[in-house]
Amino acid sequence: MGEVDPELKADTGEAFLIKDILIRDASEDYITARIEKSTVGYFRIKGPFGSHQAFRRGHAQHSHTIRVNDGSGVTVEHHAPIRDTANRDRNLMLASKVAPTGNVYDEVQALMWSGHHLNPTLLSYLGEKGIFKGFPVAEGETFTISGMNRANAITLIIYEIYDPADISPEMENGSKSNEYFFLNYG
């Protein structure tokens, strides 16, 4: 995306309710969410305390590439087959001059689900608790995310589509609202 702020515009005949924002690989620590010129959110997306809007890591069911050369023979005392994530022995062996210490066991499930966690983003967690109602983007309005220095960042905006009559800028967290859910990082 270069230096263009991600945005979502509700064209004529449509309106949105933004439920979540996920961001990965941003350069800056915080983002600002706006509807038109109104700031409706400010979230930590990086830094020593982590991100409140990080992508949830998905299933990592895969095998890694191992390159094998025809190099010189090695005398080994211990060897074990290398298995893929389907628990099949490959035509490769892991060789070691010393015996492995401790218990040795298959980590098939750990490999298949590596990095998987169920932690939701802050917005989705607060939405599940009924605290965050969403960001209403009325017909003709534009939702913009700024401040992440996004040259290589990946942004995902999760939203529901509504008829324009169902969403107004006066709703909670809207561009003309008198009531906002706002996070204070003190």
Image (tube, grey):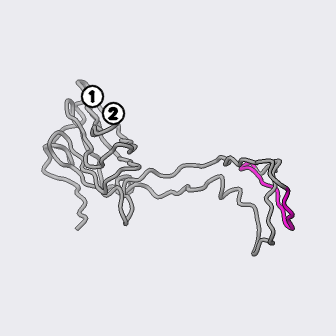
Instruction: Please say whether residue 9 is one of the residues in the magenta stretch.
Output: no
Q: Secondary structure at mark 2?
A: strand
The quarter of the rendered structure image containing the N terminus is top left
Over which residues does the magenta segment extend?
73-86
Q: How many marks?
A: 2
Residue position marked by numbered label 2 in the rendering: 161
The image shows residue 105 at horizontal and vertical percentages of 76, 65
Measuring 82% from the left and 60% from the top, which residue is drawn there? 80
The verdict on residue 81 being magenta is yes
Which residue sits at x=38%, y=52%? 124
Residue kind at label 2, given as amino acid type: Ile
Of residues 106 and 19, the one drawn nearer to the viewer in this rendering: 106
| Distance in Å between CA atoms under marks 2 and 1 | 7 Å
Badge 2 crowding class, 10 Å Cα cut-off, few under 14, some 14 to 19, many 20 or more, is some
Q: Quadrant of the C terminus?
A: bottom left
Q: Residue under circle 1? A: 14
Q: Are marks 2 and 1 in contact (CB under 8 Å)?
A: yes
Q: Position of residue 118 (x, y in %)?
A: 50, 57
Residue shown at 25%/26% (left/top)? 11
The residue most toward the front is: 72
Q: Quadrant of residue 108?
A: bottom right
Is residue 34 placed above or below 162 in the rendered structure? below
Residue 155: x, y in percent? 37, 43
Q: Position of residue 39 (x, y in %)?
A: 18, 48
Amino acid type, residue under disc 1 in the picture: Glu
Q: Is residue 177 above or below residue 111?
A: above
Q: Nearer the viewer, residue 57 or 178?
A: 57
- Which residue is pictured at 15% across the width and 45% down the height? 38
